[in-house]
Amino acid sequence: MALIWLGSFALGMVAVYARQQLNDEHQLTFLHKALASSILLIIPLRLYWRLTHPTPRQPETMPALARAVAHYAHWTLYAAALLALPVSGWFWSSVAGKPIRVLGLFQLPPERSRGV
């Protein structure tokens, strides 16, 4: 999953910053969206695995407050990286009227926000 994230991020950065040098058919944006949208399909599997398999125990010498902060920071990273980023990308592509094809197999439906 980390490789998908890193690849999608790198492709997105290249597609944005090299837009002037690339032609309209460069396909980097398509590849970025395809990789990122595949994350939406993997997220439920990752969350299921995380909830059904125990995590390594934290050191007993670690203070209780530090353990609690680590626990909540971990779940905050899950919420931000696994949910907020892919959903925000889907939202912004929908607002811009740009379709998102998942690995070239099917198209994600556009987000239907009333205020936008």
Image: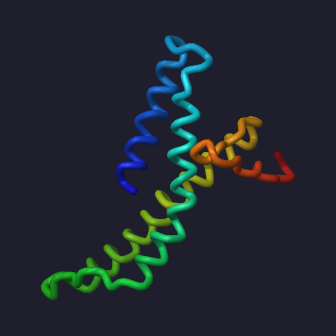
Q: Residue at x 57, y 50 (%)?
A: 37
Most distant residue in the right direction: 114
Towards the viewer: 103 or 72 = 103
Establish if 104 lies above or below 76.
Answer: above
Q: Position of residue 36 (x, y in %)?
A: 53, 47
Most distant residue in the left direction: 61
Q: Residue at x 23, y 84 (%)?
A: 57
Q: Position of residue 82 (x, y in %)?
A: 49, 60
Establish if 46 lies above or below 3.
Answer: below
Disc tally is 0
Judging from the image, the colouring scheme is rainbow
- State which quarter of the image contains the N terminus: bottom left
Q: Residue at x 72, y 36 (%)?
A: 98
Establish if 88 lies above or below 47.
Answer: above
In-image side of 61 versus 46 (left or right):
left
Q: Position of residue 58 (x, y in %)?
A: 21, 82
- State which quarter of the image contains the C terminus: top right
Q: Residue at x 56, y 32 (%)?
A: 29
In-image side of 69 versus 36 (left or right):
left
Q: Position of residue 85 (x, y in %)?
A: 54, 52
